[in-house]
Image (cartoon, grey):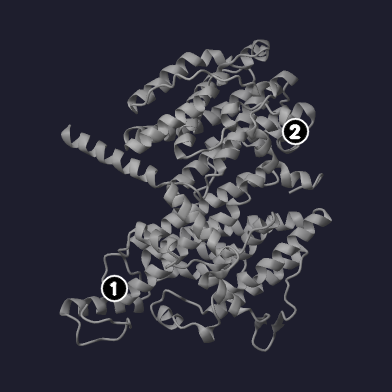
Amino acid sequence: MSTHDIDHSLDSFGDSTASATRVTPGNALRPEDIAIAQAKPSEQVAEYALRLGDDALILAQRLSHWISRGPEIEEDIALGNIALDQLGHARSFLSYAAKVWDKTEDDLAYWREEEDFRSLHIVEQPNGDFGVTIARQLIISIYQHLLYTALLESSDPTIAAISAKAVKEVDYHRDHAIAWTLRLGLGTEESARRMRHALDVLWPYVGEMFEDEELHATLGDVAVAPSTLRAAWDQEFSAVLADAELALPTIPFAMARGRRGEHSEHLGFILAEMQVLARKHPGASW
Amino acid sequence: MATQQEGGGRLSAVLSPEEQAGQDRFNQIIAEDSRIEPRDWMPEAYRKTLTRQMSQHAHSEIIGMQPEANWITRAPSLKRKAILMAKVQDEAGHGLYLYSGTETLGTPRDELNDQLMTGKAKYSSIFNYPARSWADMGAIGWLVDGAAIANQVPLCRASYGPYGRAMVRICKEESFHQRQGFEILLELSNGTPAQKKMAQDAVNRFYAPSLMMFGPPDSDSPNSGQSTAWKIKRFSNDELRQRFVGMIVEQIKILGLTLPDPDLRFDAETGTWLHMDLDWVEFKAVIAGNGPCNAQRLQRRRDAHNEGAWVREAAAAYAAKMARKTEVA
């Protein structure tokens, strides 16, 4: 029996059998399209795209570890899907950035050294228990939703187009994180205790998300200065915590300088795992 | 039913008039090649056989996520990483449809999951072999998913409606997975010498276990007769194994690799492919729990379940609170 026969024998079952992973027209922007498009960023725009791409890539790498380890199979699927969305955003931003150096998304993901990554410390933090992962998702998804919404107005058409696709997906990530924050905050004493702990563990790394760099001022309308997202983020985040009967942590922010290539101790291990196979076979294609 | 009734076609004087009518209707549906639906009367043994088969299939999807999830974080390109993540997610989805299908026969998912975690229920023994290299992602897709498709396409016509319908969707996705696996191997085979070696090594390790996925030889398959009479099973283990060998023997040529089978030849007289003797002692040992990864796979499932207990309790407590609120309002 060939695969052709299999398809043929399934034809009679009609549209109800369409794949769950089918690409819909609204999702048509692919990293491959960006890689071959004419648009090429300036070096500074590429630096900005690296920041967006690296956050998404490292978060995807972290989240993907949940697949086959979730508290329910439905959560294996949900967290896997969020990881896959983040990976898609990362691929698009990195494909775009790579063009200025005549490289590819894979050159950037697999062949850069730790200090060349521009990710935030918050995305590098270990998954912890499900509560820590949900708290990290709540922090990040509200942030990314505000950021990508603002970037719809970016004067760089590629950044705006990637953000337009990303914002729709991150909206679901935010719904997922909010729904679980409510369940865990209001569920049992144990779950509320774990959520309080999770917020304390992650809070030190929230400050870095809103720090402006010279790059933002230089890029003007292309980028969004992170400090401008702070008030809206505070309001939305506090409202969710209030609904979940969880208090805002009062812990001070840590010095975190991921944007300058000064990372947490975790990133080295994340990259060691992610890059090991590709680096064993320099020049190979997969 | 007043007595354990094994056969679907045999009539017995101990059936009540309602049961007799149910049995007659069941026999008629099977004879017409129609579908049995969840609310239809069915013999207990039919229900039991299907519950066992469908839940084993669901467990295989869930356990089968592990060897592939093992490579998500190390996938050698971002595109391959995305494809692999989507594939493992599909498997979780297949597990869910199959558990839902099994629940229509009256056994809740929690109970099925307990059977898996306690080792009472089985799953496809191939997932007890380790996925040691990236090429295993290719071999698993091409050979393991390929064997699964050969087994499952006929199940799209299984007499139990929810099973047949679940299989239609699953086969569509599996067919996609098989092509992905084939493509991984093709790329490796055309790559560097080290990549090609990796691909051949993976095919060498997965060939015999994938042939064993069709189950014991027909001469040693005690349950097959009844399943065939009930039109759950449409072809024998050996017939399906044959078809599969015939398919991969052509595809391996395109891959530029070889099948590790010195006895493989086409027998023109019978029109069948003859393959090497398979190690059924090893097969039984792996099913009995002594494969390289049985303990690891089950422990991972138990850990995920136990570590998630507080999450499920919180979700249930929250749902109960919300339900009370709605009642009051």
Q: Nearer the viewer, residue B93 or A197?
A: A197
Q: Quadrant for residue A97, please give it.
A: top right
Judge by depth and name the residue closer to the eye, B46 or B127.
B127
Q: Position of residue A224 (x, y in %)?
A: 58, 16
Specify few, some or many for label 2: CA neighbours under 10 Å numbering under 14, 14-19, or 20 or more: few
- On screen, residue B155 versus residue A63, left or right, reads left
In the rendered image, residue A106, in percent from the top left (x then y), is placed at 72, 38
Query: In which quarter of the view is residue A3 placed?
Result: bottom right
Rendered location of residue B240, percent (x, y): 56, 75
The chain under label 2 reads: A
Residue A16 lies left or right of residue B283; in this view the side is left
Locate the C terminus of chain B and report the quarter of the image it occupies. top left
Depicted B139 relative to depicted A102: above or below: below
Mark 2 on the same chain as mark 1? no
Give me the residue at 75% from left, 29% from top.
Answer: A99
Distance of label 2 from label 1 (alpha carbons): 62 Å
Number of numbered discs overlaid on the protein picture: 2
Mark 1 — on which chain does it sit?
B
Q: Which residue is mark 2?
A: A112
Type of amino acid at the residue the image marks with label 1 = Met
Q: Which residue: 47% across, 40% down?
A: A129
Tag 2, which secondary structure?
A: loop
Relative to A65, does residue A16 appear above or below in the rendering? below
> Which residue was labeled with disc 1?
B42
Tag 1's secondary structure? loop
